[in-house]
């Protein structure tokens, strides 16, 4: 039981993969027949449906050296150029052919300030090795140009039957007895995410005994609604880790929102400076693990995130506070909205000035716009010439003259 099953049962060869065989065969055919100058392959689709696993399994089958780059770690043009140039120009370390995987392409910046996507577009056509790009949503606006220059394959959500077959094979391997209805229910509630289904199976099997439908129902569907206020109360009003653990398991909220809820309400509940410091220390450690999940897809770290936000924060105090707190949603998102709304004109002007002057929008925002505000108020002729050159709207010109 000490092994992490999502790693233990990662497909080692193409025949282990579940899902659409025609698409898996198409990927293999592309890799085997690749020629220099050919468009990269662009795989897209939801979480846990086998995109990355397919590439690893096929690379094993074909005895290819797989070079993986995570685009979320290399967002700007310089980083992408430096990393990819080295990968594209080096021969294989082991004398075998090479396959290049660029994961989380949606994490690349399309902004002119950073240009990670532009750099990728320039380097990919000259590759002498097959390149596979992976993203959740290939139809994100910023991926438009990359989409045009790629061969697209969509990975659909895994079917109930696909996941049920996978779970049965794991049960057989782990010698787990199960009710057919229980395993079928487990395959249904995962929403097509094979990793989630395997994690749930490992969680329930740890209880021991035969896997039953009531055990699956106790786990709860992933979309079961549970008020986050109740979860916070379970964490904040106990010093028992067993009570706090699992407090956030059943709430229908993204982990990002859970972080914001916890962060917002810790200072309301924990009144002693020592307790407050301990709680935020545990929250910051949870955020460190979450960053590693986003960068490297180390999904096993989710358990650390939730344990630190539940038991970790519960144990940050040595006593329960008797006060009855009305927990509120984070105010940060509202503050960000107000700030962005108030600065929307300034940002729009900065982007246009940056384009006209071949600089970054950040620098234009910081250095150019304050100067232009002064100029537009005192030199109508010059300001009109600048407005025409940068294609500023009448509203933007008015903003520069009045703010």
Image (tube, rainbow, N blue to C red):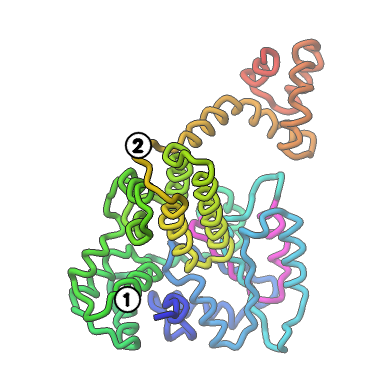
In the drawing, does residue 300 fall left or right of residue 360?
left
Of the two numbered discs 1 and 2 in the rendering, the one whose residue sits closer to the viewer: 2
Q: Quadrant of the C terminus?
A: top right
Earlier-in-chain disc, 1 versus 2: 1
Stretch of the chain drawn in magenta: 115-138
User: Disc 1 to disc 2, how far (Cα)?
Assistant: 37 Å
Q: Judge whether residue 103 can be spotted in this image.
A: yes
* Up/down of 287 relative to 334, above or below: below
Residue 83 picture location, percent across and down: 73, 66
Q: Residue at x 57, y 82 (%)?
A: 59
Residue 211 picture location, percent across and down: 23, 77
The label number, if any, that marks residue 206 in the structure image: 1
Q: Quadrant of the N terminus?
A: bottom left
Q: Is residue 353 magenta?
A: no
Pointer 1 with pointer 2, Cβ within 8 A: no
Residue at the outermost front position: 318
Residue 338 picture location, percent across and down: 52, 28
Pick the front one: 130 or 172: 172
* Up/down of 11 relative to 237, above or below: below
In the drawing, does residue 99 fall left or right of residue 388?
left
Q: Which residue is mark 2?
A: 323
């Amino acid at each position: 039981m000490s092994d992490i099953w999502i790693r233990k049962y990662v497909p080692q060869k193409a025949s282990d993969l579940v899902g659409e065989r025609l698409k898996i065969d198409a990927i293999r055919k592309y890799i085997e027949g690749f020629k220099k100058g050919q468009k990269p392959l662009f795989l897209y689709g939801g979480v846990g449906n086998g995109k990355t696993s397919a590439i690893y399994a096929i690379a094993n089958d074909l005895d290819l050296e797989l070079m993986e780059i995570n685009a979320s770690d290399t967002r700007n043009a310089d980083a992408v150029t430096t990393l990819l140039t080295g990968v594209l120009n080096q021969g294989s370390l082991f004398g075998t052919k090479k396959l290049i995987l660029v994961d989380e392409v949606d994490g690349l910046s399309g902004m002119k300030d950073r240009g990670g996507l532009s750099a990728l577009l320039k380097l990919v056509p000259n590759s002498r090795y097959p390149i596979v790009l992976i993203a959740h949503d290939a139809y994100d606006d910023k991926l438009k140009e990359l989409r045009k220059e790629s061969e697209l394959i969509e990975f659909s959500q895994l079917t109930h039957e696909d996941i049920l077959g996978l779970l049965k094979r794991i049960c057989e391997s782990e010698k787990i007895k199960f009710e057919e209805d229980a395993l079928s229910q487990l395959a249904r509630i995962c929403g097509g995410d094979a990793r989630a289904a395997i994690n749930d199976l490992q969680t329930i099997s740890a209880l021991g005994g035969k896997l039953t439908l009531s055990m699956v129902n106790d786990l709860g569907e992933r979309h079961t609604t549970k008020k986050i206020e109740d979860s916070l109360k379970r964490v904040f009003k106990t010093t028992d880790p067993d009570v706090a653990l699992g407090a956030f398991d059943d709430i229908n909220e993204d982990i990002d929102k859970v972080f914001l809820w916890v962060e917002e309400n810790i200072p309301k509940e924990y009144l002693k400076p020592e307790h407050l410091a301990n709680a935020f220390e545990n929250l910051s450690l949870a955020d460190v693990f979450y960053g590693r999940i986003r960068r490297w897809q180390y999904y096993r770290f989710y358990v650390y995130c939730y344990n630190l936000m539940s038991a970790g924060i519960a144990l940050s105090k040595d006593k329960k506070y008797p006060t009855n707190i009305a927990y509120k949603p984070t105010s940060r998102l509202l503050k960000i909205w107000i700030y962005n709304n108030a600065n929307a004109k300034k940002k729009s002007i900065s982007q246009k000035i940056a384009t006209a002057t071949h600089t970054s929008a950040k620098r234009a925002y910081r250095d150019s716009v304050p100067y232009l505000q002064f100029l537009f108020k005192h030199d109508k002729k010059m300001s009109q010439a600048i407005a025409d050159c940068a294609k500023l709207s009448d509203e933007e010109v008015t903003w520069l003259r009045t703010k």
